[in-house]
Image (cartoon, rainbow, N blue to C red):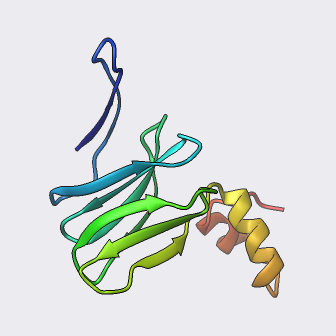
Amino acid sequence: MIHVVDSQSFEILTQFSGHSDIIADLGWSPNSQRIISADGGGFARVWDAIEGDEIWSDKMASTLNSVDWSPDGEMVILATLDPEPEILRVWQSTDELVAYAEGCCVWRELSPGERQQFGLPLQ
């Protein structure tokens, strides 16, 4: 479990649970709104630093050693036992993901069921 603690009162402000293995590394996003964490089982997770909600997760093929953010906060780098690190895009909001998809990938309107599946408003 990860705890965000007030440095003066030592009060726990937020806690994150979801890792089932030892946490190997974590880091704050450049805007301090997100935290990325990695565990020895190969899971990387991104959390909302205020609410404690998990925003994103991915399982690597091998053990994660370290994680970090790009300076703009749009990408994460995941270092494993493999010689090459993984560099992945992390969406900061559903609106950001939808805008990206509309610009590059969406070729048709989503059905009402698809919109509901992805938590998007019905049109």
Q: Nearer the viewer, residue 71 or 101?
A: 71
In this figure, what is the number of numbered marks? 0
Q: Residue 77: x percent and y percent?
A: 45, 69
Horizontal side of residue 45 vs 39, given as left or right: right
Horizontal side of residue 120 vs 88, given as left or right: right
Q: Residue 29: x percent and y percent?
A: 51, 49
Q: Residue 82: x percent and y percent?
A: 28, 85
Q: Going 65% across and 55% down the picture, which residue do you hit?
A: 93
In the rendered view, would you say 76 is above or below 54?
below
Q: Going 21% across and 55% down the picture, which residue do you hit?
A: 23
Horizontal side of residue 42 vs 99, given as left or right: left
Q: Going 77% across and 61% down the picture, which residue do you hit?
A: 122
Q: Nearer the viewer, residue 22 or 51?
A: 22
Q: Residue 16: x percent and y percent?
A: 32, 43
In the rendered view, would you say 71 is above or below 114?
above
Quadrant position of the C terminus in the picture:
bottom right
Q: Going 74% across and 57% down the picture, which residue do you hit?
A: 121
Q: Quadrant of residue 39?
A: bottom left
> Which residue sits furthest left?
22
